[in-house]
Image (spheres, rainbow, N blue to C red):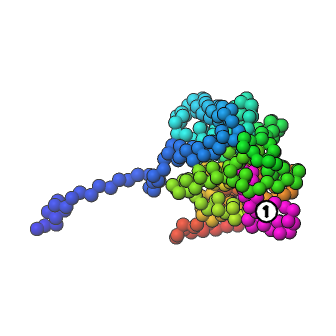
Amino acid sequence: MTTETNVENKKSIHFDLTTSPHLHSKWSTAKVMWFVNLALAPSVAAALVFFGIYQALIMITAVVFAVGTEAAIQTIRKKQVTLFDGSAALTGLLLALTLPPNLSLSATSIGSVVAIGLGKQIFGGLGYNIFNPALVGRAFLQAAFPVQITTWTKPAFAVDGITGATPLAALKFDKIFTDTAPLALGNIGGSLGETSAIAILVGGIFLIAVGIVNWRIPLSMTIGMILFGGIFWLINPLYPTPIFHIFAGSFLFGAMFMATDWVTSPITNKGMWIFGLGIALILIVIRIFGGLPEGVMYSILFMNGFVPLINRYTTPRVFGAVKEEKKK
C-alpha cells in the first residue's frame, strides 16, 4: 500500500485559526452583572425593613437614571445600546445603597447621571473606566450636597441608645460606642446598604462561592483592618477596636461589592493583596486622623488610581521573554 493511499484513508483534520482570546469563561458580562444585582437583594431588603418603603424610590430612581444615561450616551456615540446587560442597573443600585435614607430623588438622579457619565462613559464605557463608577457618583454628591449626604435617619427597631448618627460619627464626635449586635443586624444609622453586616456577608459569600468575587481582596482588606487598626488600638485603647472597624460603617459593603469590581481592581493575585492592604491602611488613617468619620469611598477610589501600576509590576514575566535593555 502506497503512502498516497495511507493519506487518502486518513480522516482529514480541521484546524480553526482565530485571534485571541483563546481562553473563555463561563461568565458573560450580563450574567455576572445580574448575579451581583441578585447578591444585593439581602442588603436591599434590610434597607427597606430598617428605613422604610421610601428607600425603594431612591433605588428605582438611581437605576432608571443610570440606565437612561447610559442609553443616551451610547446613542449619541452611535454605539450599541446595552440596556439589558445589567451593568448600568448595577451601578445605579450600588450608588443607591451608598446613600443616606430619605435622600431627595433629585440628588439621587444627579448622582446616577454623574456615575455613568463621568465615572464610566467618559473613559469609553464598560471595561475602560479607571474608577468605580458608583463611588464616583457618591463622591460627587458628597461635594455637591454635603448636608443632605450626611443627614441620617434613626432606623426602625432601634434599641435604646441608638440615634440617627452613624456608629463611626457617634464614636468620633460624641465618644459613644455602639455594640457589635446592632452592627451585625443593621438597626443602626448609616447608608442604606451598609448597616446590616449579616445581609452584606450573605450576598458577598454567595459571590465568592460562585466564583465572581475573588476572596483575596476582601480577605486582604480584613487582615489589613485587623493589623493596622490593631496597632493603633494597642497604642491607644481609646481608638476603635479592629472588630469595630470591620463591622462599623461601609467597610464590609466596600470589601464585598466595591473593591472587588473586575474592571477597577488588579488582575494578579499579588496585586490583589497589595490593593486590599492599601485600602485598609488608607481607611484606618482617615478614620483615626481625618476630619471625616468614614473613608471607605476615598480609600477605594485612591487605590483604583494605582491599579494600572500594580498590574504592571505584579504581572509575571512571560517565560522566555527577553528583558528590554535600558536606553542609554
Residue hosting label 1 = 241
Residue under the image location 52 percent in, 69 percent down: 319
User: Residue 141 in magenta?
Assistant: no
User: Residue 229 in magenta?
Assistant: yes
Q: Which residues are magenta?
A: 226-251
Q: Which sits in the foreground, 229 or 271? A: 229
On the image, the x and y values in percent for residue 154 come to: 77, 41
**Quarter holding the C terminus?**
bottom right
**Quarter holding the N terminus?**
bottom left
On the image, the x and y values in percent for residue 63 come to: 62, 35
Horizontal side, residue 151 vs residue 126: left or right: right
Q: Which sits in the foreground, 79 or 303? A: 303
Question: Is residue 186 visible to us here?
Answer: yes
Circle 1: element type: loop
Q: Which sits in the foreground, 15 or 274? A: 274
On the image, the x and y values in percent for residue 125 come to: 60, 40
Q: Which sits in the foreground, 24 or 257? A: 257
Horizontal side, residue 18 vs residue 272: left or right: left
- Most extreme residue toward the front, as rendered? 160
Residue under the image location 59 percent in, 44 percent down: 41
